[in-house]
Image (tube, rainbow, N blue to C red):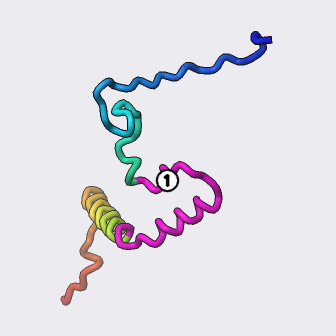
Amino acid sequence: MAFLRMKSNKKFEYQPRFYKGKESPYKMTHRFDAYRSTAQQTRGLKNKLLWALEDLGDKESSRESNRRVLLIAVILFFIFFWIMGFDFGIFFSSNG
């Protein structure tokens, strides 16, 4: 009945002869996985909620990025209106 079983994939676990490390140097990982909060191994609703609350608590970095995005948006807004020929004189009072 061996013909009814599915063939399992072959695993390639090459170990270099003189490598003394714990992990294989050929392990494929993304280079920013250590800094991502979404690249965790364990899944589940509770863990996702805990990670979301932890990310929400990091307000300093989000505040800085929000300021930067707002500054870029304002600059682009004024550049757009300057190209379109908008008269900014209506915002300034003229005494006369």
Q: Which SS does the magenta portion mostly show? A: helix
Residue 81, can we see it? no
Q: Which of 21 and 70 is in front in this view?
A: 21
Query: Is 49 left or right of 60, judged from the image as shown?
Result: right
Q: Where is residue 40 in the image (x, y as percent from the top left)?
A: 50, 51
Which range is magenta? Answer: 36-62
Which residue is tagged 1?
38
Tell me what residue is drawn at x 32 percent, y 69 percent. Answer: 64
Tell me what residue is drawn at x 48 percent, y 49 percent. Answer: 39
Quadrant housing the C terminus: bottom left
Mark 1: which secondary structure? loop
Tell me what residue is drawn at x 26 percent, y 71 percent. Answer: 88
Outermost residue toward the left in this view? 96
Quadrant housing the N terminus: top right
Q: Residues within 10 Å of mark 1 (few under 14, many from 20)?
A: few
Q: Where is residue 47 in the image (x, y as percent from the top left)?
A: 59, 60
Residue 10, can we see it? yes
Query: Is 71 left or right of 9, judged from the image as shown?
Result: left
Please tell me how many numbered marks the rendered image carries.
1
Q: In this view, does 82 lie above or below 93?
A: above
Q: Nearer the viewer, residue 20 or 61?
A: 20
**Magenta run includes residue 84:** no
**Magenta run includes residue 42:** yes
